[in-house]
Image (cartoon, rainbow, N blue to C red):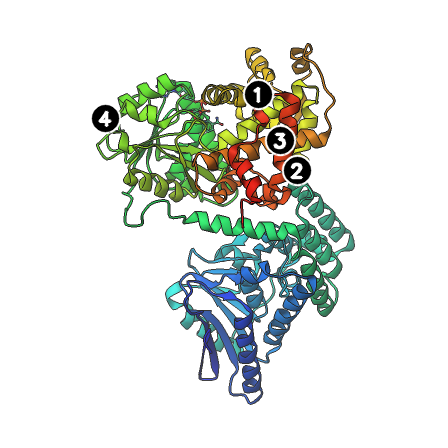
Amino acid sequence: MSNFNLKIEKKIAILEFDQPDSKVNVLNTQVMQELASIIEELAKKSCSQEVKALLITSKKDNVFIAGADIKEIENITSSQEAKEKAESGKRILNNLAGLNLITVAVIDGACLGGGFELALACKYRVASFNDKVRIGLPEVNLGIIPGFGGTQRLPRLVGLTKALVMILSGQMIPGKVALRYGVVDKLFPQVRLIDDSLDFVNSLLEGKIKINKKKKKFFQKFLEDTHLGRLIVFSQTKEKILKKTKGFYPAPLKAIELIKRTYRGNIRKGFFLESEAFSKLAVTEVSKNLIKVFYLYEEFKKYPWVDSKIKPGPINKCGVLGAGVMGGGIAQLISCRDIPVRLKDINYRALQTAFRTAAGLFAYAQRKRKFKPHQVTYKFGLISPTTTYRGFENSDIVIEAVVEDLGIKQKVFKELSQVVSAKTILASNTSALPITKMAQVTNSADRVVGLHFFNPVHRMPLVEVIKSPETSEQTLAGAIAFARSLGKVVIVVKDVPGFLINRILLSYLNEAGFLVEEGIKIEHIDRIALKFGMPMGPMELIDEVGIDVGHKVAKILEEAYGSRMQVSRLLDKVKEKGLLGKKAKLGFYIHKKKKKIPNPDIYKLIESFPKKSISDDIAFKRMIYVMINEAARCLEERVVDNPQTIDIGMIMGTGFPPHRAGLLRYADTLGIDNIVKELEVLEQKFKTLRFKPCNYLLDMQKRKDKFYH
Ligand SMILES: NC(=O)c1ccc[n+]([C@@H]2O[C@H](COP(=O)([O-])OP(=O)(O)OC[C@H]3O[C@@H](n4cnc5c(N)ncnc54)[C@H](O)[C@@H]3O)[C@@H](O)[C@H]2O)c1
């Protein structure tokens, strides 16, 4: 047996899972076969009374079982194959569940997906107080549902409402929550986990303790145990899911349908229907794409941007310049990670607003039980406001987030380089201005780097790290490690106007502006983008970012790239009119509380412009193809080296729909030849460089190439 080690002492078997040459344990075909024969052996031993109990543990640090092997799920090519896999896994876990033994899963770390389903097939589950304990069924994130019985056993164990939340959100709960939910029966100190688990088993064997199912409170009883209650639960859950996924993700809907059909019925039938549902989902394009995105995400969490020999220095204290939307958000995020941060602005009111916003975020985190009240007090206290550079001298990194104006930024960088220590990393959060130009005015350009957070800082998972030709590898390593320590995914990009993400995104926003100029309604443009799966439409996004900010960035790009990035006259006019977007409640939309209605005044600004008849299909192609073209240009200019960086950047930085697997993966599905031909038609028709296919795409077309092989 290469994956398991079975020890039997005093009639208690301990099965240790320790997958060779791997940091984690996963359930693959070979592991499941081994497990099947161990269960068979234990079944015999239980008959002969040689064994009375079984503990299943892991030898890995902080991992019980990370889940089923995703490679195997990815390689499934037919529904039949998927069904056989689910059925065979379920058979083995059913045999585990049927053992005439006291069975206990002993969890000390990640217990996810198939791993949790294995634990659910045990009669009891215990976990350690280890912070790394995370228990859940994240299958929906891969476009599938649990296939080894999880959709049947979990609702029967913890009740309908909690199980639905766990299965539909892919939520991974810590040990204490698992105890409260009744997912685990006991928590033990990590150092005594095995000893205490053995005592637990002995007490069960001796009949000294009895574990009862958690009693349902009155309202939970009504919701789960009455026909009317269940009707309410299922219809409200479905409504919530549809609102969140906009119907693009079939897995959560299938899970609801399945659980609705099987919740109080015969579990065998439930298992059968679960395999059926799993088999349909595992072969969908959505699932295959989500798996690709999962791999991308995992790859970029630790992508080796710099030589591993270069060790980043510690970051014990930070400075942030500018307490606006971004600076305030960055300071709050830093304090969340228990790092003291000095926040400077020239304007007291900005500091006040930043503190109010941070207080709101902390209050929310406390409500969601992410932080306890004393943690909030401590973390909030780590942000100290100032209008001078006092306290900046011992910062390990300073992030500049003042207004998007090169002159002001250069002034600030010059001042900074005279105040801080020689080792301090100087970072700019600029959206589009050249880092090189800011570095020039400092006394050491090698420690200047771009650190481009996205708005809202606490929610957007991406940070673009911008490397100027002068940025040292040491500075780069420090900036990357810092951004990762804040929980962000990092991409490193070349110092060109707009860097990577804004450069691509602006071509799309601009095109949307041209389409409105030509007569398409604001809300209709947004609907076209939403239909594709964008989290919000382009016009709504400009309002969200701020028309002043968006226009400034658009102008920087127009100046840098010429007529190809010409700003739409609509955006110019809206800016001239002084509309700011959502922050002033007036932009392309009139924003009222949670509602927004298109602003009729916008159309007056473009009344005199000639109108055209444009189909939805053409409008959509114009917006998406200009992005693909710009992305290809970025590869041509080596802004980044590979399509993966663009795809992860667009998903994490702009919310490009993950079920499309990324902008360039999507381009591959369209076919480069088709894209080039369509761009050429548009170029002919509109006589503009905006649609001229770049050389990179033309070469790909000639070679019949794809972005991904
Ligand atoms: N808003 C976004 O969506 C977004 C996203 C990513 C990056 N950015 C970039 O982040 C930077 C800040 O943007 P923002 O939206 O937070 O702007 P903002 O206007 O909300 O805040 C800028 C703050 O800088 C302060 N300031 C001006 N000069 C200063 C000085 N010399 N010293 C200290 N503070 C000074 C202002 O008082 C203001 O409070 C810009 O470079 C912007 O391009 C913005």
From the image, state whether disc 2 or disc 3 is nearer to you.
Answer: 3
Residue at the far bottom in the pictured view: 48
- Name the image quarter holding residue 153: bottom right
Residue placed under numbered mark 2 in the picture:
532
Which badge, 2 or 1, is on the more N-terminal residue? 2
Q: On the picture, is 314 further left or further right than 8?
A: left
Q: How far apart are marks 4 and 3 (CA)?
A: 46 Å
Callout 2 secondary element: helix
The image position of residue 564, as x and y in percent, is 53, 23
| Residue type, mark 3 in image | Leu
Residue at coordinates 44% horizontally, 28% vertically from top-left? Answer: 326
- The relative height of residue 255 versus residue 473 in the rendered view (above or below) is below
Q: Distance between the residues labelled 2 and 3?
A: 19 Å
Does mark 4's beta carbon lie closer than 8 Å to ligand 1?
A: no
Callout 3 secondary element: helix
The image position of residue 597, as x and y in percent, is 68, 23
Residue at coordinates 65% horizontally, 43% vertically from top-left? Answer: 245
The image position of residue 373, as x and y in percent, is 44, 42
Q: Which mark is residue 443?
A: 4
| Residue type, mark 4 in image | Asn
Which badge, 2 or 4, is on the more N-terminal residue? 4
Callout 1 secondary element: loop
